[in-house]
Image: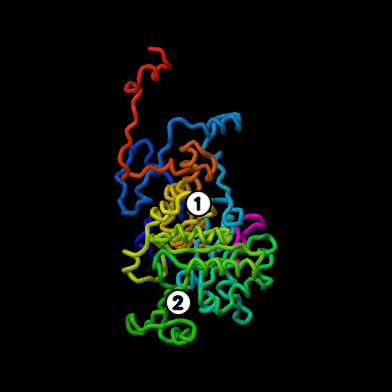
Amino acid sequence: MKSLTAVELPEEQIRLRARTGTAAVFPPAGEYGTRLFGAASRVDSGDPLDRARLAPPVFMPLRLEKLIDLGREPLHDDVDLRTGIGGFTSSLPVFLSAFGSTQAGSGDLAIAASRQAGRLGVPMVIGENMVPVHGYRRGGAASPLLARIGAYLEQADDQLGGVVVQQSTEDADSEVWNLVYSDPATGLLLASGRLAFELKVGQGAKPGLGGMTVLPAAEAARLADRFAVSDVLDPGSRLRCASPGTFTAEIVRQQLRFMRNNFPKARIWVKFHPGRDIAEAVDAAWRAGADAVTVDGAEGGAGWAPLGFLDGVGLPLAECLRRIGQPTGCLLVTGRMWEGGRVVRALALGARAAGLGRAALLAVDEDPDAGLVRLVESLALECRLLISALGKYTPDALAPEDVWWPDTPPRWTPAPDDLPAVERIGGQQ
């Protein structure tokens, strides 16, 4: 039985991919021979990254280099998507985003997503407030945090991917990183360099606020000594609010110094909300030694957030990428990621990888055994098709020149007949 909805995403297309995988990249095969295809009017979501187009050139010197290297004409299957993400080796430029301690992100669906992320060989981020809400160990049973790590390791090999554990203000009070770092259950990750800790500064769905969940009154009373609890919802429900934390550039630098000193074998990640000073923030994190910085665009999802924030607060991801410009470190992005086109455009604009959040949960809601694997396989095929169409064969070869913005004024280029005759034919008229 399906338990989730995400009306702001193309839910049916995501669920189709979770069921049929790469077949959903194309029109239905049964329509071949009876239907003619062409460009459709794209749905204008208002999202500038969705409105941008990839623009392959005519002349492709990197394709010529690939041809010479292979000794034959290259195809899309020759695109190598393996990449480095925040100190890990990943099979694809994709990672599983943090779900946090919300109801949707803490139960069986999160376990299924963890298992499939391990199978795919992509990094997985475990979100904030898991320990303050659910505990770290519950008698002989694994807590949701440890259950997700265990499920990931069941399917992962010892070379690809890695696990990232977030910590926010309430997590720090529970000493989450200390617990994870010293736990024998994470020894394999630590020994193989596949454990990271992420300092969560903010998230795209509610910039400037902390995590929020809805609780029954009795459960809210149990957590009242750890979180702010408000009676602002329907009768019987309570709003649980985590602190957003207080940050300046100096505080971020000191926090990262603390993380490097106290957890020297763990990679260091930082996650920012799409603030107007995002370029300054990511620069501060990279200069302080962050292995990866995640920018969650205003399109990012949440298990719960005020409607006014979802509709009108924070910069779109495209604007964040424009303000950051050429990254000087590993830049990761999240927000409405579910198909290859948006991922490739983000990579071309400087990102190293893109995170799947709501789409991943929908995929495992559709099929807990293989839904996320099929969704990512379809995304990977699209990435290979698109990157090869640009005449390139690795994600890091992508560049801003590969993206065309519809709002950009047309650029006039002299036609050959407009050039001086001496230039037109090499000086011969």
Q: Secondary structure at mark 2?
A: loop
Q: Nearer the viewer, residue 198 or 143?
A: 198
Magenta-drawn stretch contains 157: yes
Q: Is residue 363 visible?
A: no
Q: Which three-letter amino acid code belongs to the residue tagged 2?
A: Ala
Look at the image and give the residue range highlighted in magenta.
Answer: 150-162
Q: Quadrant of residue 417?
A: top left
Q: Report which residue position mark 2 lands on.
A: 242
Number of other residues with Cα within 10 Å of mark 1, as a class: few under 14, some 14 to 19, many 20 or more: some
Q: Is residue 234 visible?
A: yes
Q: Position of residue 124 (x, y in %)?
A: 55, 61
Q: Secondary structure at mark 1?
A: loop
Q: From the viewer's perspective, tell me whether residue 358 is left or right of residue 111.
A: left
Q: Position of residue 129 (x, y in %)?
A: 51, 74
Q: Give the image's coloring scheme.
A: rainbow
Compared to 353, does 256 lie above or below?
Answer: below
**Which of the two discs, 1 and 2, sits closer to the camera?**
1
What residue is shown at x 32% (from left), y 23% (from top)?
418
Q: Position of residue 131 (x, y in %)?
A: 55, 76
Label 2 near label 1: C-beta < 8 Å?
A: no
Residue 412 is labelled as none
Q: Position of residue 40 (x, y in %)?
A: 31, 43
Compared to 412, does 26 lie above or below?
Answer: below
Magenta-drawn stretch contains 39: no
Rendered-image quadrant of the C terminus: top left
Q: Quadrant of residue 323?
A: bottom left
Compared to 126, does 86 lie above or below?
Answer: above
Q: Which residue sits furthest front?
A: 250
Number of other residues with Cα within 10 Å of mark 2, as a class: few under 14, some 14 to 19, many 20 or more: many
Q: Nearer the viewer, residue 12 or 239?
A: 239
Q: Report which residue position mark 1 lands on.
A: 327
Cα distance between the residues tagged 1 and 2: 31 Å
